[in-house]
Image (cartoon, grey):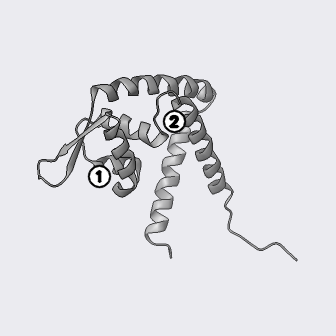
Amino acid sequence: MPAESAPELGVLFDVLRADEAVGAMLRGALGGTGLTPTGYAVLSLVATLGRTTPTEVAAHIGAKPSTLTAHLTRLVDDGLLSRSRGADGRSADLEITEKGRQVRVIAHRDVDVVWQRASRDLDVAGIRAMLADLIAALSAATENPLR
């Protein structure tokens, strides 16, 4: 029986494999901090953005705010982020705590050691540009799948 014709998915599967490799690298580097890769991303974003909202964090990560709820709850429960009522009285504001800053410094150091070794011979700027193009193309294609 002949193989079925299928769209070229090789690059998509390559990206999935890269995602798995990045996740494994981050989990290994973050092991001593108690942070997950998503927790590290959120903590780093809040540290960079300053006082912010879950919606803003989700937009930077490219996720729905509801997707981050469990991560935010854990970071608040662990004392790494503080959550307070926003100026409108309905939304929440997030800020990094002193403990969060200390954990982030350790996490960043540990991730950086592995990343510097792994990326030594890579064109990081070129990879980021290609990934930005891929994300834009996929976003455009999924807004109107019949194009």
Residue on which disc 1 sits: 55
Identify which amino acid the numbered label 2 is placed on. Answer: Ala
* Residue pictured at 25% horizontal, 47% vertical: 53
* Residue pictured at 47% horizontal, 33% vertical: 34
Q: Identify the secondary structure beneath mark 2.
A: helix
Q: Residues within 10 Å of mark 2 (few under 14, many from 20)?
A: few
Q: Nearer the viewer, residue 18 or 80?
A: 80
Residue 61 in the image, given as x and y percentages of width and height:
40, 47
Horizontal side of residue 18 vs 95, given as left or right = right
Q: Nearer the viewer, residue 59 or 123?
A: 59
Residue on which disc 2 sits: 125
Horizontal side of residue 94 vs 135, given as left or right = left
* Residue ranking furthest to the front: 77
Identify which amino acid the numbered label 1 is placed on. Answer: Thr
Horizontal side of residue 59 vs 26, given as left or right = left
Query: Is residue 12 positioned above or below 147 on the image?
Result: above
Residue 133 in the image, given as x and y percentages of width and height:
50, 51
The mark nearer the N terminus, 2 or 1, is 1
